[in-house]
Image (cartoon, rainbow, N blue to C red):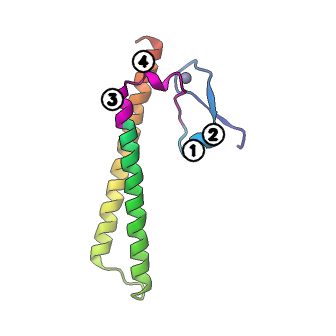
Amino acid sequence: MKDSRVLCCVPHCRRTIATERVAPHTQWLCGSHWPLVPKKLRGFKLKADRTYERSKDVFFATFHEADEHAKSNNGGVSDEIIQRLHQASDRREKARQRCLRTWDRCKRRAIETAMGI
Ligand SMILES: [Zn+2]
């Protein structure tokens, strides 16, 4: 799928982008349609993305810490680390859901504005 392209989410827009340029995402708004999303909403989206990236960093750092702890304790991990791992995992999932919801709102606004709704 090296040469595959992703179409802009706005119906009848024929602009595409290389799949690898949007990966891991599978949807995209082109340079003409993304600016139709109100600036405030675009800000929410960027903030949600940053929060999600941070939550992933925290999760992987905690996971690494648990792994190191297990290595030096014959496989044993403290309840405290396990609890933090669960919390980091929950936060990451909530941040991911928020990203998806915010993206859906952006997409809807771009489509509505482009269609004159
Ligand atoms: Zn477009």
What percent of the width, then of the height, locates residue 64? 43, 71
Quarter of the rendering occupied by the C terminus: top left
Task: Say whether disc 2 or disc 3 marks the residue closer to the N-terminus.
Answer: 2
Select label 2 or label 3 by which is in front. 3
Q: Identify the residue at image location x=58%, y=17%.
A: 12
Callout 4: helix, strand or loop? Answer: helix
Circle 1 residue: 23
Residue matched to label 4: 112
Q: Pointer 2: what residue?
A: 19
Q: Is residue 96 visible?
A: no
Q: Is disc 2 surrounded by few (<14), some (14 to 19) or many (20+) residues within 10 Å?
A: some
> Looking at the image, how many numbered discs can be counted on the residues?
4
Circles 1 and 2: CB atoms closer than 8 Å: yes
Q: Which mark is residue 40?
A: 3
Residue at disc 1, secondary structure: loop
Residue 28 lies within the magenta run: yes
Q: Which span is picked out in magenta? A: 27-44
The kind of residue on which mark 1 rests is Ala
Q: Are marks 3 and 4 in contact (CB under 8 Å)?
A: no
Crowding at label 3, few (<14), some or many (≥20) Cα neighbours within 10 Å?
A: few
